[in-house]
Image: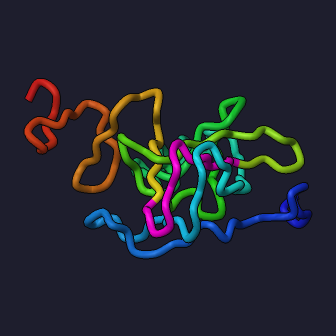
Amino acid sequence: MFKQKLKNGKWFSKKIEVKESTVDKEGLGVFATEFIKKYEIFESAPVLVWHMDLLNDYMRLHQAGHLLSDHVFVWEKSSHALCLGYGTIYNHSNEPNSKHRRVFDKNHPRIEFIALKDIQPGEEIFHHYAPKKGDLFFTDGGTFDYEGVIDSNEFRKVNS
């Protein structure tokens, strides 16, 4: 499935690289190595797709979370997708400079990352992982917390 080249002949863009993030405690991030213009597709990453019950059953059986649950994209027909390439390395921001588009191609399912604005060389590329959920906040353990708000630059629970 991933042995054939895509029609454009590229798997990875030379316009991006992975290095230490500018965000405290985030580890790695993805950065532009060249100018990326607004609306340009700068990465087309293959995905591995599986039915969401596989991950849900594992977590129920072991009464624990799984690393994959924080790194998957919702796919079609009750499926999840793990993005290969740099797709899980982009750091989250509520003010991103990129977005993604799921491509449900039977032979080459993929996620394309697209610039929302001009991105300069050396600039870190940020992504909003759940745009329909609104702003996302994270617990100290790094997991999403949908019921938090920022107040005076500090995270707090709603109704706390």
> Residue 41 versus residue 66: which sits nearer the camera?
41
Q: Give the range drawn in magenta.
A: 111-124
Identity of the residue drawn at 87% across and 42% down:
106
In the displayed structure, does residue 97 sit left or right of residue 135? right
Please, is residue 66 above or below residue 25 in the view?
above
Which quadrant of the figure has residue 14?
Answer: bottom right
Residue 121 covered by magenta stretch: yes
Residue 54 covered by magenta stretch: no
**Whole-percent x, y for residue 153 in the image:** 12, 44
Which quadrant of the figure has residue 160?
Answer: top left
Which quadrant of the figure has residue 144?
Answer: top left
User: How many numbered badges does the structure rendering display?
Assistant: 0
In the displayed structure, does residue 121 sit left or right of residue 94? right
> Residue 123 versus residue 87: which sits nearer the camera?
123
**Whole-percent x, y for residue 159 in the image:** 11, 24
> Residue 33 versus residue 104: which sits nearer the camera?
33
**Whole-percent x, y for residue 135 in the image:** 33, 34
Colouring mode (rainbow / by chain / secondary structure / one colour): rainbow
Identity of the residue drawn at 37% across and 68% down:
21
> Residue 141 versus residue 19: which sits nearer the camera?
19
**Whole-percent x, y for residue 112 in the image:** 68, 48
Identity of the residue drawn at 37% across and 42% down:
95
Please, is residue 147 above or below residue 56 in the view?
above
Identity of the residue drawn at 45% across and 42% down:
128
**Residue farthest to the top, as pictured:** 159
Which quarter of the figure is the N terminus placed in? bottom right
